Amino acid sequence: MEIVVQDRMQSGYRYQRVAAPGEDFDADFAPEMSPRQMLELGVFEGKYMTDCQSEFPTNWYENARQSEHADPSQNAFGLKSRMPLSHWREKGWIFGPDPRGWFQWYCRYWMGRRLPAVDTAQIKRWRAFSRHRGQIRANCGPMDLDCRPRQRQALLQWAYDPFF
């Protein structure tokens, strides 16, 4: 299935969905949260991909915490968690055909797009992020959700379950 993207950050970008949604993931990639769950739990202060909903299933947005302007109260842990895209670009974290970064890549990957070189790089970044879970385990008691809330919010934004 071919997808044609028309939003504020991309116009006319085309890609193929070659895998069934949520299936056929790389063996090194086992996200714990779906994009829909992430949006419902509150990621990126509610201001993320609000202009490109037509690219993804409508049920992803039925209970999503979204806002016209960045609003930290929309996040699962109720705190500021985002940096401007300019910072991400400066760090080299935005690459390939996904101008919004990792989460946009993940949403497209979840829906079945496969771009081997980009996928390998993004999966490597995702795997490296798991170190934050180890820091929480080493410094927080079980289910102490008030301990390291910024790291927990960050885990959520990388498709890791922050509620442990």
Image (spheres, rainbow, N blue to C red):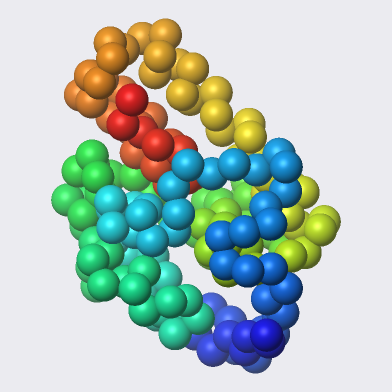
Q: Is residue 129 above or below residue 94?
A: above
- Closer to us: 64 or 100: 64
- Closer to us: 19 or 132: 19
Q: Quadrant of residue 111?
A: bottom right
Q: What residue is shown at x 37% (from left), y 53% (from top)?
A: 38
Instruction: Give the quarter of the figure containing the C terminus.
Output: top left
Left or right, 47 with reference to 84 = left
Locate residue 36, reporting x and y percent.
Answer: 38, 61
Left or right, 14 with reference to 144 = right
Q: Is residue 108 above or below residue 154?
A: below
Instruction: Give the quarter of the figure containing the N terminus.
Output: bottom right
Q: Is residue 54 above or below residue 50?
A: below
Q: Quadrant of residue 62?
A: bottom left
Q: Quadrant of residue 113?
A: bottom right
Count of numbered marks? 0
Locate residue 14, reporting x and y percent.
Answer: 69, 85
Residue 8, can we see it?
no
Left or right, 98 with reference to 32 = right
Locate residue 74, reporting x and y percent.
Answer: 21, 54
Q: What residue is shown at x 34% (from left), y 38% (from top)?
A: 153
Left or right, 17 with reference to 66 = right
Q: What residue is shown at x 31% (from left), y 31% (from top)?
A: 163
